């Protein structure tokens, strides 16, 4: 019965929490603290702080921890599964709709219209990264990292993951 409660406690915020993990945190708190009494508000705040300190999506980290505390390893699996299941179901549904539309005039028009929007969004993100890099790291470091990355990618054809690791090491040592 506890695993069903864990599933419900994390599935409902996954369905209702429009906007991702941060928007579902109050819903998870309502379920975990108020409805089931698995934690106090203070304990939940500590779990939230721990989840924010770790990399990755906050909702799945919290679900894994709370699920483990309440139901052990299987409770953790159930909680994480219930957290991602609503998004997974929606993605499968949307993928099936798009697959059925593939090759039609509407689908071709849709992809033609979406490509420029995606390009603009990626451009805005890149511009924001560059602007904050110049401010936070300084012009010299930013130019060195850009030039070194360009040379590694184009001239030596180094895998992008290794270029990212280089940037991390450079930043850890010099910044």
Image (cartoon, rainbow, N blue to C red):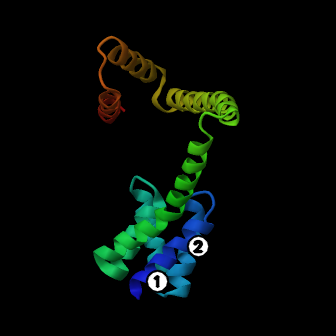
- 55 left or right, relative to 22: left
Residue 23 in the image: above or below residue 124? below
Where does residue 75 sit, x and y in percent of width and height? 35, 76
Rendered image quadrant of residue 13: bottom right
For label 2, the residue is 27
Residue at disc 1, secondary structure: helix
For label 1, the residue is 5
Q: Residue at x 45, y 23 (%)?
A: 142
N-terminal of the two: label 2 or label 1? 1
Quarter placement of the C terminus: top left
Characterize the local packing of mark 2: few (<14), some (14-19) or many (20 or more) Cα atoms within 10 angstroms. some
Residue 7 in the image: above or below residue 145? below
Q: Nearer the viewer, residue 72 or 62?
A: 72
Q: Residue at x 65, y 34 (%)?
A: 104
Residue 131 in sight: yes
Quarter placement of the N terminus: bottom left
The mark tally for this picture is: 2
Q: Residue at x 35, y 32 (%)?
A: 171
Q: Nearer the viewer, residue 46 or 108?
A: 108
Where does residue 40 sit, x and y in percent of width and height? 48, 83
- 45 left or right, relative to 67: right
């Amino acid at each position: 019965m506890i695993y069903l409660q864990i599933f419900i406690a994390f599935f409902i915020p996954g369905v209702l929490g429009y906007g991702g993990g941060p928007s579902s945190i109050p819903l998870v708190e309502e379920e975990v603290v108020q409805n089931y009494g698995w934690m106090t508000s203070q304990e939940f705040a500590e779990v939230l702080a721990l989840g924010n300190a770790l990399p990755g999506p906050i909702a799945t980290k919290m679900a894994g921890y709370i699920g483990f505390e309440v139901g052990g390893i299987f409770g953790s699996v159930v909680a994480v599964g219930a957290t991602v299941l609503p998004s997974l179901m929606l993605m499968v549904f949307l993928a099936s709709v798009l697959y059925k539309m593939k090759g039609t005039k509407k689908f071709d028009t849709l992809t033609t219209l979406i490509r420029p929007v995606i390009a603009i969004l990626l451009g805005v993100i890149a511009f924001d990264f560059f602007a904050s890099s110049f401010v936070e790291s300084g012009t010299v470091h930013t130019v060195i990292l850009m030039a070194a990355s360009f040379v590694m990618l184009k001239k030596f054809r180094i895998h992008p993951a290794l270029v990212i690791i280089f940037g991390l090491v450079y930043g850890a040592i010099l910044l």
